[in-house]
Image (cartoon, coloured by chain):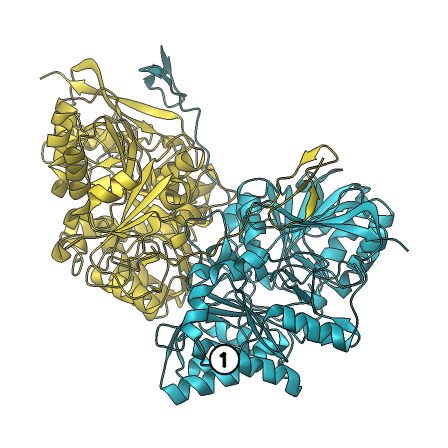
Chain colours: A yellow, B cyan
Amino acid sequence: MKVQNAAGRTIQTEINGESYKPYGGGIKYQPTSKLVDSLQKALKTCGVKDGMTLSFHHQLRNGDFVINQTLDACRELGVKNLRLAQTALFSVHEPVIEHIKEGTVTRIEGSINGPVGDYVSKNPLQHPVILRSHGGRWSAIRRDELHIDIAVIAVSQADMRGNATGMLGKSAFGKICYSQPDMMHADHVIIVTDTVVEYPCIYQEIHEGYVDCVVQVDRIGDPDKIVTGSLKITDDPMKKGIAKSCVDLMDAAGLLTNDLIFQLGAGGISLAAVPYLQQRLEEKNVVARVQTGGLTSYIVDMYKAGRMKYMYHSQCFDTGAVEFVSHNPPTFQDIGHYADASSKGRTVDMLDAAILGATEVDVDFNVNVNTHSDGRLLHGIGGHQDVAAGANLTMITCPIYRKKNPIVRDHVTTITTPGDIVDAIVTDHGIAINPKRKDLLKAIGSSIDLISIEELRDMAYAETSTPEPLELTDTLVGMTKYFDGTVLDNIYQVKS
Amino acid sequence: MKVQNAAGRTIQTEINGESYKPYGGGIKYQPTSKLVDSLQKALKTCGVKDGMTLSFHHQLRNGDFVINQTLDACRELGVKNLRLAQTALFSVHEPVIEHIKEGTVTRIEGSINGPVGDYVSKNPLQHPVILRSHGGRWSAIRRDELHIDIAVIAVSQADMRGNATGMLGKSAFGKICYSQPDMMHADHVIIVTDTVVEYPCIYQEIHEGYVDCVVQVDRIGDPDKIVTGSLKITDDPMKKGIAKSCVDLMDAAGLLTNDLIFQLGAGGISLAAVPYLQQRLEEKNVVARVQTGGLTSYIVDMYKAGRMKYMYHSQCFDTGAVEFVSHNPPTFQDIGHYADASSKGRTVDMLDAAILGATEVDVDFNVNVNTHSDGRLLHGIGGHQDVAAGANLTMITCPIYRKKNPIVRDHVTTITTPGDIVDAIVTDHGIAINPKRKDLLKAIGSSIDLISIEELRDMAYAETSTPEPLELTDTLVGMTKYFDGTVLDNIYQVKS
């Protein structure tokens, strides 16, 4: 069929069985501002309604004002039954408990640290909390297992069109790497900032093509709590000892070469490992290839000292790291690149060695970082599983007991990271290698002393006692998912 | 239902009517190389078969070896009926004609410059060629109107995992901005490079998460033709006169302020406008806000001279531009951000003024850049429509006639950009303003002389002759689409 279009031309609307729509007229675009003066207005513009999923990132950490402000706005709008899909909650988000009590929030998928975790452990939500790793969350969004209706993204600087960064401005917190999938896949995107700059905002981690509204608030957070001024390396000889053992193990496994790709992280023992690793590399006259994962000042210093050739960086853990990335603009990397399990290749796949923490480990090399031994859900997964599956040598660091609680035990309270992908448990009483890793055992040979995981458990139990099984109700509090979307473990309410 | 998963935990597989899959076991990822030693192997790995759509970018321009190499590999594999979804073809791609004759290629959606265009004009393909603008292509891919089976992306440097850039290496050509939607939405991605570097390749415009295979070839192109050493500003007084008139018009319209956002481009008249604009800004002591679009050395020099505050950059048109971006790593911008019509905001929406070229214009302010007046399809759309719709003052530059051919005429041979979004025709015989733009006419007032489009046409016809309508067959050669996916015009074969 032929029709005349709005430009006066006769065009064919069907060719070889395929349909074509005639031009209907062109309009001149206007450079409109997306600034709205309140979160309520922005949420209404984005069609907020009962049952929707709202997402947030956690990079303002315990200084964040944005989640509480947004939920207050939802309360004022009378919206109920929201699903929170934050990357993490902290102590500052205690007001979320009130929103749960009032029915504003009835479902949570994301990490929970602190009081909200304690509350839902005792007062389970109708839907269990779903915990995913960084890479697991990314791929869940990409696969639409976790569909986000409205992404509310805190940024430290934005322009009126929605171009935005976390690296500049008075509340700078580093790269907004966790919100990239939210930006790309959410139906609506609201940018919240305390610093609106002249168009165009530079370092456009978020770009206008994805943004519906820009809301300027007084402050997005408490600057003293957004980034820790400087992370301090522990003086605890126990932790320092474990850190040194990790470096010894890497050395024994033959990994300290110019090809070394490693991730240490920001935990206490991980931080303590940085100077040991740097010193050992100096002694061996080795320059590591690259470090991945979150950035601390210590890693930046090691880079500046010439002990690594490249440095991937995603989130920033302290002021020094924020300072560094703001002067060395974003070349890489986002969390999807780092760990998206649905992708064709992740940065973590290249890891030779990684140091991770643990709340508990068990004789099957399973690791728990989510629940305390009393069953309370108090922490998220972070990149734990992602890194463990990627690294050739995944080292889990912990003392064998803490106070009267055995850390190495028969069964972890909750499986966060399965023993299938854990290679070594490095403790204050020795190093146990997963017996499945015959290649690793062979590489190490007799160059360092090893101990069996069962011996570590026995030593732990001898110093404490054999833990009693928790008495559980049949009410689900939450679940841990593996990064491929399957369920690793269910977390039940403990009988009170 | 409860089942035991591979970690030995009993988990619930249905909760509140939603299904959950049990963990099935974890594997340690291996840092495998994606390098394969031939395009054939890569294409087979990606499951190439008859009828598939293969995409390419055009940033190696007339120096490109990759499209021809890929089609030769397809021929050797016996694959037929391919659809090419390149961003553009040039003279170097003349061998595509053989692939059309042999049935390897039966469908083309993308710009065609030169001999292939001439060939298909005389020997139409079974499916008409579909021409889209930069932003129209991006959104067609995003909406899955143009589904890409295999994206073949030429890069100047890559690592074995598929991280890649166009800014470094012996065949550096600038940012790979056109291939971002291909990377993100194609089922398979093949990286072709002549320079494989140690992992990780920096400036990761393409990242491993999207890449199936990396193919190392001897050369991706002829370096002398990939980027023009230095674009030279014309000595032609006619073109220089039109360029100066554009700056006069911008001035008369009151646009030469510190808020100016502009795009000039790399065409002859556009290039010639740079020094005029720079000089006028100096005289007025004005610093423009930002320039958008492709980058030339002249724009870089203007930036370095302090006559613009920010500089967006996508493709690089010459060696100086490539050199600049390789030392000032990618902050912005990709073509989607620039012009994706399916997005919530484009860079071009902010334009105050833009200079664009024309093969023909008509009294309805329609513009043709695709076909010659003899009906042959010889050029693509580029960003023409995208920019025209976005800029407050869209200036179309051309002489009123070329040799014996009237350029300003009653009807353009093909509509590329509809008169709805064109504001001014700036010629060697005067400036015509679209009468729909009453606001613009008012702003200009009597500050410069204007002329009607009909007068320009009459002058053109007086110097040449009234053009005869082309005698057309009823066989379709191609069509131009507006960036919203609708059809602007059909291009028919001319009777021979």
Question: For mark 1, does the 10 Å Cα neighbourhood hold few (<14), some (14 to 19), or many (20 or more) residues?
Answer: many
- Nearer to us in this view, A41 or B401: B401
- Nearer to us in this view, B111 or A33: A33
Residue at position x 30%, y 36% in the image: A47
- Nearer to us in this view, B3 or B141: B141
Residue closest to the far right:
B496
Residue at position x 40%, y 81% in the image: B307
Say whether residue B351 is visible: no
Residue closest to the far top:
B1
| Quadrant of the frame with the N terminus of chain A | top right
| Quadrant of the frame with the C terminus of chain A | top left
Secondary structure under the numbered disc 1 in the rendered image: helix
Residue A483 is situated, as x and y percent measured from the top left of the image, at 39, 34
- Nearer to us in this view, B115 or A101: B115
Residue B184 is situated, as x and y percent measured from the top left of the image, at 52, 46
Residue B137 is situated, as x and y percent measured from the top left of the image, at 59, 50
Residue A379 is situated, as x and y percent measured from the top left of the image, at 21, 36
- State which quadrant residue B12 falls in: top left
- State which quadrant residue A473 falls in: top left
Which chain does the numbered disc 1 sit on?
B
Residue at position x 71%, y 67% in the image: B62
Q: Amino acid at mark 1?
A: Val
Relative placement, left or right, of A51 versus B90 is left
Tag 1 residue: B247
